[in-house]
Image (cartoon, rainbow, N blue to C red):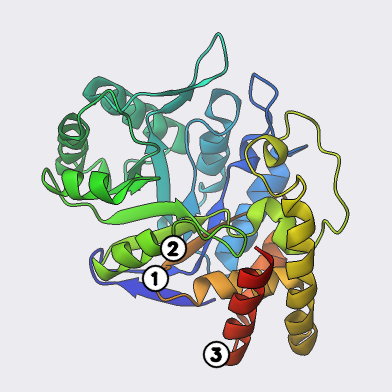
Amino acid sequence: MNYKENQLTQERISVLGVGTWSMGGTNKFGLSYGNVEEQASIEAIHTLIKNGVNLIDTAPVYGADSASEKVVGIALQGGYREKVKIVTKFGNVNDPQTGKRVINNSYDTIMKECEESLQRLQTDYIDYYLMHYPDPNVPIEETMRALNELKLAGKILHIGLSNPTQELILEAEQYGQIEAIQLPYSMVNRQQEELFKWCHNRGYFTMSYGSLGAGILSGAYRELPHFDEKDIRYTFYPFFKDPMFSDIQCLLKEMDKIAHIHHVPVSHIALNWVTQKDFISASLVGVANQDQAQENSQAFAFSLTDEEMLFLDHAIEKYL
């Protein structure tokens, strides 16, 4: 496993992190990542930790009744908690009547959600506590007041922002220390690249999510799949709809050439491409079972050369 040290947090973190959105299973409105078994999720987490992964990301909104956080809490019993840094979030919930996303980053909500997350995760502290999405109705000063109090109380160690704008980061910095940023980034989604570079230059611990493009960069989908209409891979991501699906297939053929040289799965090419970017501290990748966890853990047995990185960059520019 490869690691990067962040000077701001003074922590050495694996470049691969456990993404657990899919481990939440199906929420009460039918949205899911397909069939996910709790025991398979726990075994996947254990496999990743045994292979050197020390970062795990979750959120209360992942799954019905915060199922993902509960699975993580169970998986980290028996001595595993001390081996990882936990990332979880606040302020993003599904309306109990409509199922629509509701963002609430108010002081009272944060204080309540933190206590609930601590209970579900079966831990006394959260390493990285992140705003899940910006809330246009709550001043960032109020949000930061809650986070500063939680940090002072030792319930959270680091304050972070997920899906922020540059302007919001700068505003938040007026009221406290921001140490971590989480944004989407992959070979098929580079929209936040400039913001990632800016964050890296400011010393933040930067986490990318969606690094395998909801699985399309694993190479497992060479023909347009027919997901359930409530499958998150279909509702949340654009990758499994044409014309983007067909464009990505062209990119995958170029990735196949590099994968063949190194005798590795195409997913290893995608993961190395992300983590070899100096502005990415860690890449969060979802897994559904032990086999996927083992395969992802082995992705860093080699490195892409500068020429291969450039070849892939050119392929992305050409097809996407």
> Type of residue at label 3?
Asp
Q: Position of residue 242 (x, y in %)?
A: 77, 47
**In this figure, which residue is indicated by the disc labeled 3?**
306
Q: How crowded is mark 2: few (under 14 residues within 10 Å), some or many (20 or more)?
A: some
Q: Looking at the image, is 35 positioned above or below residue 261?
A: above
Q: Position of residue 36 (x, y in %)?
A: 73, 39
Alpha carbons under labels 3 and 1: distance apart: 16 Å
The residue at which mark 1 appears reads as 279
Quarter of the image with the C terminus in it: bottom right
Q: Element at badge 3? A: helix
> Helix, strand or loop at disc 2?
helix
Q: What residue type is labelled 2?
A: Glu
Neighbor class of circle 1 (other Cα within 10 Å; few <14, some 14-19, many 20+) is: many
Foreground of the two, 213 or 21: 213
Q: Position of residue 175 (x, y in %)?
A: 11, 43
Residue 278 visible in the snapshot: yes
Q: From where the camera sits, is residue 158 visible?
A: no
For badge 1, the amino acid type reads: Phe
Q: Residue 243: where, in percent of width, then height?
A: 75, 50
Query: Which tag, 2 or 1, sits closer to the chain's start?
Result: 2
Asked where in the image residue 171 lies, by quadrant, the reply is: top left
Quarter of the N terminus within the rendering = bottom right
| Name of the residue lying farthest toward the left | 174
N-terminal-most mark, 3 or 2? 2
Task: Say which residue label 2 marks.
Answer: 193
> Would residue 286 be found to the left or right of residue 86 on screen?
right
What is the CA distance from the residue labelled 2 to the residue labelled 1?
A: 9 Å
User: Which residue of the protein is positioned furthest toward the top in this rendering?
Assistant: 97
